Image (cartoon, helix red, strand yellow):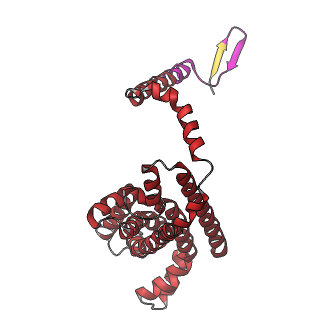
Amino acid sequence: MPVIETAEGPAWRLRTPRGRLLLWLGWFALVALTVWCWQVMTKDTIWAFVADAPSQAADIGARAFPPRWSYVEKLWLPLWDTLNIATLGTMLGVIIATPVAFLAARNTTPSAMVARPVALFIIVASRSINSLIWALLLVSILGPGLLAGIIAIALRSIGFVGKLLYEAIEETDATQIEAIEATGASPPQVLIYGYWPQIAPAFWGISVFRWDINIRESAVLGLVGAGGLGLQLQASLNVLAWPQVTMILIVILATVVFSEWVSARVRHAII
């Protein structure tokens, strides 16, 4: 903390005059950047629509209530499809991500020059593309249906599960691994008896957590033709059936709350 000489004697200051000047210049640059970004983002905005937005929202809200409770009978099968997309996609993603994680971890990869970079690239590529984009691409390739949704969820899950799992593998206690290797155990036995007991809680916790996330994501994949509740949502939006839209949103909310409860209970039981 600098000392500044004043008429009354030395005084303590948090910053020197040069430091205060640089601070003010930094704040000025930040404000200027914010103003410029705001102008870029809003250059095509039609402000008349923005001013009319509250009345439009109130109009849609009035049309959306009360929900069409009788429509829930048509949502059970799409809801089942959504749960299947999330569950099967998660299982497929975990099956693929597990060996990828072992290849990516520094202490288990067979080749730090080849296998590890390839595994890390797979993880990054999976995490960089949203599941909705995966579904859009797969619907174009495989056609509309649940298969595209399942594979989209799996491809998105590989990066998430693989990254967290390989970090858990790298954090394992090396002394336990060395003790098992000292007994003459084979590499598969080292994985089963050395690594697996240490990463099992993390593995199950990550898998259940990803399943919980996939419930949310699979609910909207139908917007691009991948089946599930999103398909019913898109159909209702196309005909402006707002009471049906409200009912679908209520079902999605209830499903997400239930999956969150199940996920919390399972993680608590495991960990």
Region of the chain picked out in magenta, as a range: 6-25
* Picture coordinates of residue 141, whole percent (x, y): 26, 64
* Picture coordinates of residue 194, whole percent (x, y): 51, 82
Nearer to me, 20 or 132? 132
Q: Exactly how many numbered labels are in the figure?
A: 0
Please give the name of the residue rendered at 43% of the width and 55% of the height, measured from the top-left corner. 235
Residue 130, can we see it? no
Residue 222, can we see it? yes
Magenta highlight on residue 188: no
Magenta highlight on residue 19: yes
Please give the name of the residue rendered at 43% of the width and 54% of the height, measured from the top-left corner. 234
Nearer to me, 139 or 260? 139
99 sits left or right of 180 in the view = left
As drawn, which residue projects farthest toward the top?
7
Nearer to me, 16 or 119? 119
As drawn, which residue projects farthest toward the right?
8
Please give the name of the residue rendered at 57% of the width and 52% of the height, measured from the top-left corner. 246
Nearer to me, 214 or 142? 142
63 sits left or right of 125 in the view = right
Rendering quarter of residue 125: bottom left
As drawn, which residue projects farthest toward the left?
141
For the N terminus, the image quarter is top right
As drawn, which residue projects farthest toward the bottom?
184
* Picture coordinates of residue 37, whole percent (x, y): 42, 29
* Picture coordinates of residue 259, whole percent (x, y): 59, 66
| Picture layout, residue 265 above or below residue 44 | below
For the C terminus, the image quarter is bottom right
| Picture layout, residue 269 above or below residue 224 | below
